[in-house]
Structures are given as C-alpha cells and as structure tokens.
Amino acid sequence: MDARQSVRQVGPVVIDIENITKDYVMGEEIVRALRGVSLQIRRNEYLAVMGPSGSGKSTLMNMLGCLDTPTSGRYEFNGRDVAEMDDDELAAIRNREIGFVFQTFNLLARATSLRNVELPLIYAGMDPESREERATQALTDVGLGDRIQHKPNELSGGQRQRVAIARALVNDPSIILADEPTGNLDSKTGEEIMALLEDLYQRGHTIILVTHERDIAAHARRTIRLRDGVVESDESSFVPRLETVAAS
Amino acid sequence: MKRFLYELEESWRIAYAQMRSNLTRSILTALGVVIGIVAVTLMGTAIGGIQVGFDKSMAVLGDDVLYVTQWPWKPVDDWWNYRDRKKIQTEYAETINRMIAATPNSNLMVAVPTSSLMRSIKYRGNQVENVFTLGTTSDFTVTSTIDCKEGRFFNEIESRSGAQVVVIGYDVADALFPSESPIDKSVLINGHVFKVIGVNARQGTFLGLFSWDSMVAMPLAAFNKYFDVKNELDARGENQGQSDVRVKVRDKTKLIEAKDELTGMMRRVRGLPPEKKEDFSINEQQAFKSTLDPVKNTIAIAGLFITGLSLFVGAIGIMNITFVSVKERTKEIGTRKALGARRRTILLQFLIESTALCLLGGFIGLAVAYFMCFGIGKAFPSFPIQFSFGLVIASMIVSVLTGLVSGFAPAWSASRLDPVTALRYE
C-alpha cells in the first residue's frame, strides 16, 4: 500500500488561530503582512504552507513557531493563549512544543552533533546523563548514530539537516516546523530529507512544512496557500476525520 | 536552580570554545585587562608597602612612649606662639626620673634624654655626610626596640662615663665598611674618635621617615662633650640641633593618665604657675599617625584612581569585543532563542564570555605583577613591597566585576534581540 494513500487517525487540535493579523512598521509605511488568517491544525497532521514571497508565509510561520506574536486575533497552542505571552513564556513554548528545522540548518559550527542536539534539553533543564541518552537516541533515529561526535563541517548537507531534525525532535515537541528544509540541498538529498519527514509523520509526529516548491509541498497531506496575507486555499488530499480507514 | 546550573555550565563551555576559536582576538582584548590588573595590583602592593613602612617607622617611635618637645607633632597655625618657647633640656630627664621614683604607682617608667645633630662620619677613605647623630643614655633601649645585627648598644657604665663609643645604623655601616666588620673599628665624627660597638639590623627606609639605618647613637655625655646642640647653626644660620625627652609609659592602655602625670611633672620642672599655659608639648605616636594618615590615604586613593583608569580602558576593550561577538553571532542567538533559550540564558552566556576574558586577563596580570614585585624586591631591597593573598583575591574580584560591568550592555542587547530578526540576520 502506498503510504500516501493511507488515512490516519487525526488527533486533537494543537494550533487554533482565529483571524490573526500582523502589521509591521517599515519607516513611514505600515506593512500588513497578515490580514486575518484563521487556521486549525490537529495532532498528526502533515501540513504544507505555500505562497509566493510577500504572501505572508514567513510571517505566518513566525506566528506558528511562537517566534512572534500577532497584532490582533486569537492564537491558542494546546489550549493556551499564546498571543499575550511574554518573551520568556514564548521561549518555554518553543522549547517544549516546537521543533524547528531551518533552511540553513542553523547548527552551532563549533559544537558536535551531540552537543547541537542536546541544546534544547539544556534549556529544558535536563540532567547531563539523560541529555546525552536522549540526544544519542534522536541522532540514531535520523540515521546518524555513527556521527554523534562529528562537527557540522565534517558532515554533508543532508547529514547536517538530519542533525537539525534530530535537534527538532529531541524534546518530543507537539509540532515540527520545517522552513524550506530542502532549500539548501540538491534534489536527491532533498528527497532523502523528505523521506525522513514522511517517516516521522508515519511515526506520529505533526509536521508543518513551509515551502514555495510544489514538489516539496506535494509530500504533505494538506496544503494551505497564502496570497496577500490571507488564506487563498486550504486543500486536503484526504478528509481529516477521526476515523481509520482500513488499509487495503 | 538545576536548570540555571546547566545553563551556567553550558555558558562556560561556550565561552571557552569562543576564546579558543578567536585566540588572537581574545588575547589582545585580555591584554587590556592584563595591563589594568598589573597597574592596580602593583599600586595595591605599593600602598601595602607604604603601610608597612609607615608602621615600621611608627614602631620606632613606640606606642608606649611620650615625647616632650618644643613643637607639637601636628601642623600649627600660630607658629609664633611656639617659636619662642624655651628649648627642652636634656637635664629634665634626670629631674623627671627623680619625680617618678618619688611617686608611688606612677604611670611612668623612665625618662630618657636625647640630643641630635647632623654630623659627618669618616672611616679611612670613606665618609658619610649628614648622619643623624643621637646622644642619649643606655635607657634608650627601654623606649625603643634596638635590634643589633652585630655587637651591642652601649651599657650604663659607658653611658654615665661618656665613653667614646658609637652604635651605627645599617646604611652607615654599609657605606663606611663595605667589606669588613665595623665592630671595634674607630670612626671619626667631626674629627673625634669613636669606637663602633654595635651595628643595627636593617630596618628599611620610607619617605625619609625615622629609620635607624642612617643614624648613629652615642652616650649623651660624650655627645655633649664634643657637640653643642644649643649653638649649632647650619649654613642658613638656623639651629638644627634638637633636644627632647622621651618617657616610657608603664601601661600603654593608661596613656592618657600617663600624659597628664607627665604634664604635671613638666609644669613643675618649668615652674609654671597654675594660670599659665604649658610652654612645651607632649606627643605620642598616635598624634603623628593622625597627621600622616590623611596623607597616606590620599596617596592610596589617588594612586588607585589613576591606575584604575587603565583597568577602565581594558574594560572598554572587553565591552567592545563583546559587542562584536554579539553582532557576529546574531544568527546563533536567534537559533538559540528558537530552541528555547530565554533572555536570562542569553544574558548569562555573554556575561560569562566577558567575565572569562577578564578572568584570563586577571590571572595573567596577577602573575606578571607577582614577578614584577619579585624583581623590584630584588633590585631595590629598601622599597617596601607587600604582595598579599588578599591582593590576589581582590584583583580576582575586580576582574570578575570588570567582566560583568563591561559585558552587561552587550549581553543585555543580545538578550533583548527579537528572535525573528536575529534568525534572519546574515
């Protein structure tokens, strides 16, 4: 059976956004990056956010990743109101609930894979032994069990992104937020990374993919297109219902 | 709390990695702190040395000795009231001693006369000018701790008989007898022959304050036989000779009572009626100390302030490099924030980086200062130097504080960075 065709159980709502807007002040002008976006994302979804540059895609990603707060509107993450949180509360949400995967990997250049993956656990206050155990496990899960003492410059691009994915996974977050994860990789390596994300999805992770590439977005089960700060379309390749269709 | 410890450990690790990967930059920046710490530490050492030298000089005066003098040991505005006072006579000592003997439970122990002049001393080809020449009695050893390196102080018999013997200071001995023992040698003091019977141990000089090193002492009877204190005039026609009486107190906790008693005795010696003011001064070490303390403190404050400026320059260097470091690693800060680093975490990280640099500078500076002190101590043995453990602690604290203060502004700006902007920074 093609995994793409399988319909999986979808869990409770993780992200609930209602009519959020975001304005930026650029000199004299006010740029309205988001003009009222409403969105619900459930556990175990695999969602792609698409849109041309200037569509508000990055702004929405920053909102979803709790890196920024909306100018107006409601944002609940696991039932908690995020829109009114201060910097440190947002940091705690990011630490525990969100795993970031960046286009440029954003690994610490002078630290080994293990140390890079341990970072979120340090901020979570975990003791050194458990930290090392968890980080080693996460690296093994992404197929880098034999690269834990390597530094980023000793790894290939694909391996670096795997380290970044292991780092995103290590704190067992509610969502994995991948921003153009294949943007800096050749297409073959990109496919490997997408296969890894698919694997994570199959293992029950919630994945939000931000991309402008149709091929990449095609891996997701649901695609949201943004244009001029509003949702243009929201399509699912299957109906997300709380029921399991027997694989046949 | 635990999390804080882990973050602290992580910050130290980052700071170490950061210093290693920017070695040249780190060393150059730390150099500013090194210079600052060396300057401050050497100043601290010098101040410590001044204190020691000061205390040594004070110990010569003795904290249980009262000095009867014409002039008080403090600055006076109405000097004309003192100028015409009668000179202190060495004979007063005998009178006072008789009074002490006649007073039951006297607070005073013994009075010792001293007369002094500047004299030149000669031994064969060597001559020393302007030596502080003191005439006194054998009781002098009671009022002042005399530590003879060789030989002895003159005894009571020599004192009474006015024997032509002399005890010389370390520097005098060194100048006159560079390669032989001075004991039993005959020196010429203004043409008169004296036999050296003792050499004082080295005391060290400080700001030209009292030191035995450049003095000679002889029995007062011999002194009076050859030198005339009262009519001794220098080139400007001023009398440089001086006679005092010093009185040892039995119990230094009763210094005030002793002073009152001595005042009464001196009034009787001088025959002053009750309504007349005293025409003499009675001084003790404390009075001298309170005059010199402000001077000493001013030197200390001014010195530390000036050397502190060099440390300040070092701190600016640290601040500058921390700003550069924050700028360079803006993206890293963004990443860390995305991964859950809180403001405090980022603040701590950069504070520790700047502190680590300052501590590095502090350690190197301290080592340099230590060796410099050692070198100075070897090259100029007379310069009092005091390198103490407290100074080590103090300079480490100063280093850490410098790091914290200079790192605060950049660390604060780093901790306030907006994660979105920071992540996008290239």
Image (cartoon, coloured by chain):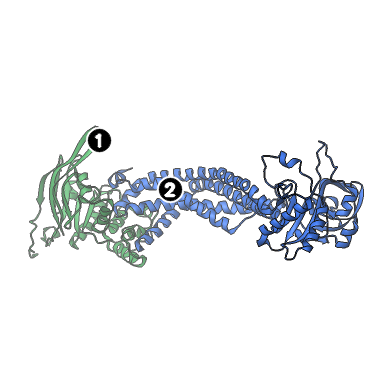
Chain colours: A green, B blue
Residue B62 shows up from this direction: no
- Residue toward you, B355 or B384: B384
What residue is drawn where x is 39% and y is 53%? B349
- Image coords of residue A166 (percent x, y): 29, 59
- Image coords of residue A13 (percent x, y): 13, 57
- Residue toward you, B143 or B329: B143
- Image coords of residue A47 (percent x, y): 16, 53
- Image coords of residue B377 (percent x, y): 68, 53
Q: Which mark is residue B407?
A: 2
Residue farthest to the top, as pictured? A28
Q: Which mark is residue B408?
A: none
**Secondary element at tag 1:** strand
- State which quarter of the image contains the N terminus of chain B: bottom left
**Secondary element at tag 2:** helix
Q: Amino acid at mark 1?
A: Met
Label 1 vs label 2: CA separation? 31 Å
* Residue A135 falls left or right of residue B111: left
- Where is mark 1, residue-wise? A26
Residue B286 shows up from this direction: yes
What residue is drawn where x is 40% and y is 58%? B8
* Residue B345 falls left or right of residue B274: left
* Residue A30 falls left or right of residue B297: left
Q: Amino acid at mark 2?
A: Gly
- State which quarter of the image contains the C terminus of chain B: top left
Provide the chain ID for the residue under circle 1: A
Nearer the observer, disc 1 or disc 2?
Answer: 2
Q: Residues within 10 Å of mark 1 (few under 14, many from 20)?
A: few
Q: Do callouts 1 and 2 point to residues on the same chain?
A: no
Provide the chain ID for the residue under circle 2: B
